[in-house]
Image (cartoon, rainbow, N blue to C red):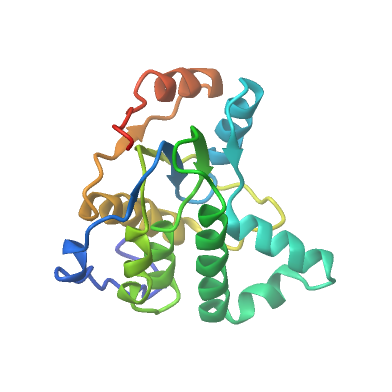
Amino acid sequence: MPQDSPHEFRTTDLDVVLLSTRFRVQTNWHVITGAPSCGKTTLINLLADKGFRTVPEGARQYMESEMARGRTIDEIHKKGAALQRRVADLQLSIERGLRANDVAFLDGAVPGSLAWFRVFGLNPNEVLPRCFRHRYASVFVLDRLPLRPNGLRFEDDAHAGFLDEWIARDYGALGYSVVRVPVLAPEERLGFVLERLAVPELP
């Protein structure tokens, strides 16, 4: 987080006892994640164009559904803590609806809630046990791009820097070999990811 950041984000570490929890199900899912405006949606769309199954981000689905009901983005974000809990619930529900053996690319996943909980002053250990329901095959964290408005975004550069750091740290703490995806042209990023896919041994 920048030294002159006006925000006071929570920096709680993950509980070492909880981190010893065993994963319940090994999956063939690949997570595409990163800070806001890192190019996740562009990459997910390219993967879909190539015929891969892709899974939309729970947070985006929730906010779009609320806006369709007439709520503004400011109203949705006003109660940030409640929002993050709803998003975490929705993301877990989405993942429960997937088959572990199917190859899928997820636009974010449950462990992403850990960093977002900190942003809104929540203890990430509240949501940590949910991170062990599924183990992902690969985790790709996209390097940041300049922030651009998308009608859903409220974050500034301090948010983006904090999330970029903590998303990678949290996945690493959970035992994943995080693959950083550099800033490249979209098609080059696609090739970078496809060359580095992990193939787990599924039961």
**Above or below, comparing residue 40 to residue 51 in the picture:** below
Side of 59 where 164 appears, left or right:
left
The front one of 187 and 91 is: 91
**Above or below, comparing residue 129 to residue 103 in the picture:** below
Residue occupying the point 23% across, 49% down: 172
Residue 49 locus on image (x, y percent): 66, 23
Residue 45 locus on image (x, y percent): 63, 32
**Above or below, comparing residue 143 to residue 194 in the picture:** below
**Residue at the extreme front of the image, as rendered:** 203
Residue 198 in which image quadrant: top left
Residue 201 locus on image (x, y percent): 29, 32
Residue 12 in which image quadrant: bottom left
The reply to whether residue 1 is in sight is no
Residue occupying the point 49% across, 49% down: 108
Residue occupying the point 45% across, 50% down: 35
Side of 172 where 96 appears, left or right:
right
Residue 68 in which image quadrant: bottom right
The front one of 119 and 112 is: 112
**Above or below, comparing residue 202 to residue 24 in the picture:** above
Q: Quadrant of the N terminus?
A: bottom left
The reply to whether residue 171 is in sight is yes
Residue occupying the point 27% across, 71% down: 11
Residue 88 locus on image (x, y percent): 50, 67
Q: How many marks?
A: 0
Q: Quadrant of the C terminus?
A: top left
